[in-house]
């Protein structure tokens, strides 16, 4: 794997885990200038730091990859046209919703149910600090698709069977969400995003489908008051 990809992975994981350090710092600043209760301070601090750290991460990743040549097996060949890519993104978004519903139904057959804690937490953050919607609907999909599809899936597919590469990268994608009860949902989503990327050879396609899916999740959280 080329050096720039390693830098991208490092940037992603630093941003991911920086909440452990950055959030307490922001919380201390807010405590000094406001009289909000601790629960609200923690919510605001996590929200502001998540947006800030991911904006910085996206900028760094863009600078690292803007002149990076297409190098993985997935990217070899002619990319899909813009019109075909748009169709894949829209239909892929619909397929993601269907796949997610089927995965949740299968989970319920084994007694696993309830709302996703990740989605509820992000919805709560977005209601408190609306700019968090930018993080969940734009920044997170960009970073996750570049890391898990373009780099991890792409590099694994260049060395392993493409189906094995898709499963491994999707498992990593699911595990990074730290919600094992919803692992099947994340793996199904990951596999479908790998398929979109493979068929179009454009990382923008799974990014767009992922964005649309997250936007719908946020709309549900807002309209149903976090009880979705």
Image: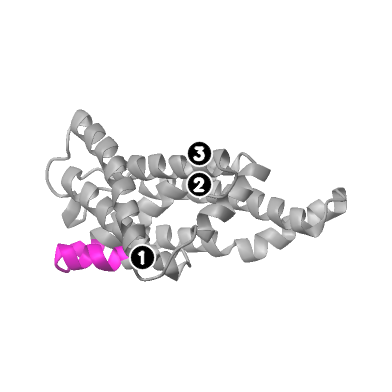
**What secondary structure is marked by label 3?**
helix
How far is the residue under mark 2 from the one under mark 3? 11 Å
Find the magenta span and give its range. Answer: 155-170
> Which of the 4 image quarters holds residue 24?
bottom right
Residue 125 percent location from the top left of the image:
63, 49
- Label 1 Cα crowd, 10 Å radius (few <14 / some 14-19 / many 20+): some
How far is the residue under mark 1 from the one under mark 2? 24 Å
- In the image, residue 139 sits, relative to residue 84, either above or below, namely below
- Label 2 Cα crowd, 10 Å radius (few <14 / some 14-19 / many 20+): many
Earlier sequence position, callout 2 versus callout 3 = 2
Residue 147 percent location from the top left of the image:
37, 57
User: Any magenta on residue 160?
Assistant: yes
**What secondary structure is marked by label 1?**
helix
Residue at position x 19%, y 68% from top?
164
Residue 11 percent location from the top left of the image:
48, 59
- Tag 2 residue: 136
- Tag 3 residue: 219
- Label 3 Cα crowd, 10 Å radius (few <14 / some 14-19 / many 20+): some
The tag on residue 107 is: 1
Earlier sequence position, callout 1 versus callout 2 = 1
> Which of the 4 image quarters holds residue 81?
top left
């Amino acid at each position: 794997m080329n050096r720039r990809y390693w830098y991208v992975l490092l940037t992603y994981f630093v941003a991911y885990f920086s909440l452990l350090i950055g959030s307490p710092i922001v919380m201390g600043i807010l405590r000094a200038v406001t009289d909000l209760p601790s629960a609200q301070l923690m919510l605001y601090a996590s929200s502001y730091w998540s947006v800030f750290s991911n904006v910085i991460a996206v900028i760094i990743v863009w600078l690292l990859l803007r002149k990076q040549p297409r190098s993985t097996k997935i990217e070899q060949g002619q990319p899909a046209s813009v019109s075909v890519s748009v169709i894949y993104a829209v239909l892929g978004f619909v397929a993601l919703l269907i796949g997610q519903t089927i995965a949740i139904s299968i989970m319920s057959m084994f007694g696993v149910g309830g709302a996703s804690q990740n989605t509820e937490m992000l919805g709560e953050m977005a209601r408190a600090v609306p700019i968090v919607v930018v993080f969940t609907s734009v920044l997170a999909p960009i970073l996750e698709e570049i890391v898990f599809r373009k780099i991890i899936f792409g590099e694994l597919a260049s060395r392993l069977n493409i189906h094995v590469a898709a499963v491994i990268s999707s498992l990593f994608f699911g595990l990074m969400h730290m919600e094992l009860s919803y692992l099947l949902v994340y793996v199904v989503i990951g596999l479908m995003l790998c398929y979109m990327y493979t068929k179009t050879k454009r990382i923008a396609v799974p990014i767009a489908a992922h964005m649309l899916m997250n936007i719908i999740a946020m709309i549900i959280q807002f309209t149903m008051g976090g009880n979705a």
